[in-house]
Image (tube, rainbow, N blue to C red):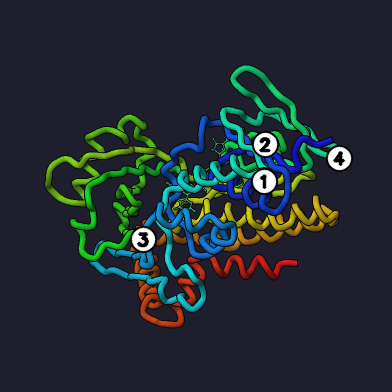
Amino acid sequence: MADYDVIIAGGGPVGTVAGYALAKAGLMVLVVEADSQPPEDLRASTFHPPTLEMLDRLGVLTDMLPLGLKAPVYQYRIRATGEVLAFDLSELADRTPFPFRLQCEQWKLARLLAARLAAHPNADMVFSRRVVHFSQDADGVTAALESPTAIEQLRCRYLIAADGANSIVRKWLGVEFEGFTYPEKFLCLSTTLPLDQHFDRLAYVNYVADPDDWHVLLRVPSLWRVLVSADEAASDADLKSDANKDAIFGRLLGDGPPVETVHRTIYRVHQRVAQRYNHGRVVLIGDAAHLNNPLGGLGMNSGIHDAINLAEKLPQIILEGAAAAPLLDRFDRQRRTVMHNFIQAQTIANKRLIEARDPVAREEYYAAMRAVNGDTDKRREYLYNQAMFKSLDDAAVIA
Ligand SMILES: Cc1cc2nc3c(=O)[nH]c(=O)nc-3n(C[C@H](O)[C@H](O)[C@H](O)COP(=O)(O)OP(=O)(O)OC[C@H]3O[C@@H](n4cnc5c(N)ncnc54)[C@H](O)[C@@H]3O)c2cc1C
């Protein structure tokens, strides 16, 4: 006898979306979060239009919208020439009710959903518990949950691993996490200084291409965030120092008083995909299944798309008795194909463009972006693609 239909390891944005979608579909769900609450994580800040459509269908968008900023326009800026190539999602207003990115910190979604899960009759969410081990048999999965004082064993029919980049579930499965890790680190500084007053026509999302000093300027409701690449050889302490912070803002803003920061965070960045997402009764989603660089804001969004796809299939298996293997194999084919063909390819291309050093390659990239930006049809296609609609269309037709 199972304690739950589904146990989800990890209560980040992806695990909480999966948990809430499954509870709403009628399954008994437990979401297990290692931290004492969904961590106040500064990583993802962009929700793309199809993700907003999914959150709307889940009935949570009305509560989300006031927590973020609508960003219809994002920009590519070519620093050497001062060009601003603006892309306006309003051009897709005939294809989506939400023709904008929502700039909203990822933890706000996780916390909103944690509250919804706590109130839902089909769901439990526990904190300060860590999934440390599992075993599976023909009837279900036994998950071991470690608390500060004990280890508890719970039975479920399916275990979803949404436990992030260092997923212990993925490690126990022994599945290859193929790909590479960038040598450099990424440094993210946040500030309450209104950066838009220092640049002409800054949007809420700006990718600034520069062979020596590329950066991303992003607005969330209370802060501006500056993302730069950082020397792999420098120590974390040096990268987070006032001297480095002042040098970065000096290059951005010129001479002026020191800029106060709220956060100084260092990330290692990877391009990796698990060799397979479904393993019997255990399924990997989100960062547990795939990692990519943050240029384009695709990682969490694609994890939420995994969660919604899986939450359509598991109820068919558990409530309607559909055969599990064909549905879960299709989940794997759909989501892993999109991950390789679009998310990995696009984020690697985005990084090449923003940092291109070779003058010939750089001019080719810039010329291609100008051509897309200047042509109505190509620009609409680009907007549709970058907003992740095409990746979902492509996944839908995978048998
Ligand atoms: C600088 C930066 C900017 C980014 N910006 C964007 C963006 O704008 N848009 C976008 O789409 N993506 C972005 N990303 C990627 C995004 O942050 C991740 O893809 C996203 O956090 C993945 O969500 P997740 O729920 O799968 O994993 P996580 O957010 O890592 O959540 C995993 C959760 O599981 C918990 N956990 C871990 N181990 C266990 C365990 N054993 N048992 C129980 N709980 C456990 C953790 O405490 C955590 O709460 C960015 C990444 C970086 C580094």
In percent of the image, x 30 and y 64: which residue is there?
A: 77
Kindly indicate the quadrant of the structure image that contains residue 58: bottom right
Q: Where is residue 156 in the image (x, y as percent from the top left)?
A: 77, 38
Q: Disc 2 vs disc 3: Cβ atoms closer than 8 Å?
A: no
Q: Disc 1 vs disc 2: Cβ atoms closer than 8 Å?
A: yes
Q: Which secondary structure lies at badge 3? A: loop
Kindly indicate the quadrant of the structure image that contains residue 16: top right
Position of residue 325 relative to residue 36, above or below, is: below
Count numbered badges in the picture. 4
- Residue type at mark 3? Asp
| Residue 358 disc label | 3
| Residue 169 disc label | 2
Q: Is residue 191 left or right of residue 265?
A: left
Indicate yes or no: mark 2 CB to ligand 1 under 8 Å.
yes
Q: Nearer the viewer, residue 338 or 370?
A: 338
Circle nearer the N terminus (1, 3): 1
- Residue type at mark 4? Asp
Q: Nearer the viewer, residue 4 or 363?
A: 4
- Residue type at mark 2? Val
Circle nearer the N terminus (4, 2): 4
Indicate yes or no: mark 1 CB to ligand 1 under 8 Å.
no
From the image, tell me which residue sits under label 1. Answer: 284
